[in-house]
Amino acid sequence: MDERRTVVALFGLLVGLVTAFIAYRFIAALTVAVFLYYSTRRFYKALGRLHVPRQVRALTVLSLLAIPLLLLLSYTLVLLVTETQRFLETYPVVEAAGTNFAWLGATDEIPDLTVDGLVDAYQAGQFEVITDFLVEHAAVLTNAITGFFLNLFIVVIVTYYLLIDGHRFHDWLLRFDDDAIVREYLEAADRELEAILFGNLLNVIAIALIAVGSFMGYNALVPEAVEVPYPALAGVLTGVASLIPVVGMKVVYVPLAGAIAAPMVISGEYSLLGYLVAFLFVAVVIVDTIPDLILRPYLSGERTHVGLLMLAYIFGPVVFGFYGLFFAPIVLALGITFAHTALPRLLGADETPDAAPGP
């Protein structure tokens, strides 16, 4: 009997190791899926009050995430190309850089963003440099593209089934309950993860709305020459960028400041620099600093300290890479919850209510 139990245990250990290895290979996709699950679960449950089937609810949630994101990225790319074309046509950058950058000098003009314009440019040989680059690096580009879509597929599938079948995994874990410790820890960790990760989503939405309103208000008060280009899009991108640790929204409003300043510097209209200072004040103080001080304490979870959470957002990408932005807060929430719930009981401490938070 003991030999059979040993064989079964060894087989289970082998399966567990293989599963862990596969999960490690796709840890980034799985982490993003967990982040999306907890960020959208409240909305998924809210749709349940309308008696919408689980599959339809999950597809609705994923669609409301994916479609706006794809539209945002596509719109941003089109505007980037269009504005680059307009800038190069307005200012003689290509001619000035032609002596140092042969590939820029070889392009006499930017092709029109139409099918006929792109076909004519291809027939004229304007895309030869790009074509040669793509052919030379075809293997690397193919691996990168297939890897991206594979990870995207994993994120969508895992998030979908977590939404519709997450309760089954929860019930399975409770089968190993011992003196209600496991149940207490799982329920507390589940609440904390939802509070933190759903708070992230709310923070992105709030920052985006504040940024859109601030940029539009700035544009209404300044001359056309120093307006923020596409303030609605810039505001939404600012909200998304608030997820990035340390630099955060600066990756959006610093280039915007450069885009506002470039025409002034090129044309020599330095009298308008005061408006640039006003824009930086709006971006740094109203969009970046004040919302961070006011909103973050309310969106950081029930137990997790705001300072620890900020450190997790900073150190996570440094230690784990990009997915550490989502992985480190999850690990922190699990650890803090374990220290508050399971650890005292395992060490035999008396059950006492949580201390009230300090001032």
Image (cartoon, rainbow, N blue to C red):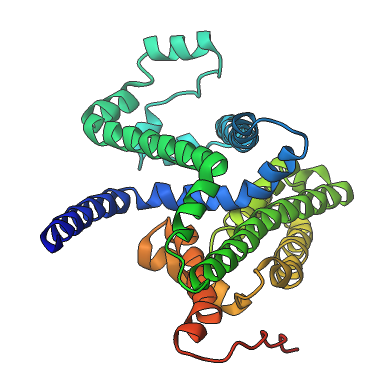
Q: Residue at x 54, y 36 (%)?
A: 92
- Up-down relation of residue 315 to residue 269 (above or below): below
Provide residue 74's location: percent of width, then percent of height.
Answer: 57, 31
Q: Position of residue 243 (x, y in %)?
A: 58, 58
Question: Position of 73 compared to 8: left or right?
Answer: right
* Residue shown at the point (37%, 63%) measured from the top left: 320
286 to 198, vertically: above or below: below
Q: Quadrant of residue 274?
A: bottom right
> Residue 72: x percent and y percent?
62, 36
Q: Residue furthest left?
A: 3
Count the marks: 0
Which residue appears at 58% of the width and 35% of the height?
66
Left or right? Give the position of 107 relative to 73.
left
Q: Is residue 309 above or below residue 48?
A: below
Q: Position of residue 348 (x, y in %)?
A: 48, 90
The answer to whether residue 312 is visible is no
- Please state which of residues 262 and 214 is positioned toward the viewer in this rendering: 214
Q: Which residue is located at x 51 percent, y 8 percent? A: 116
The C terminus: image quadrant: bottom right
Horizontal side, residue 56 vs residue 150: left or right: right
Residue 47 visible in the displayed image:
yes
- 273, 168: nearer the viewer: 168
For this orientation, the residue located farthest to the front is 1
Choose between 135 and 59: the one closer to the eye.
Answer: 59
Please state, as top left, top right, bottom left or bottom right, where the N terminus lies in the image.
bottom left
Q: Nearer the viewer, residue 347 or 262?
A: 347
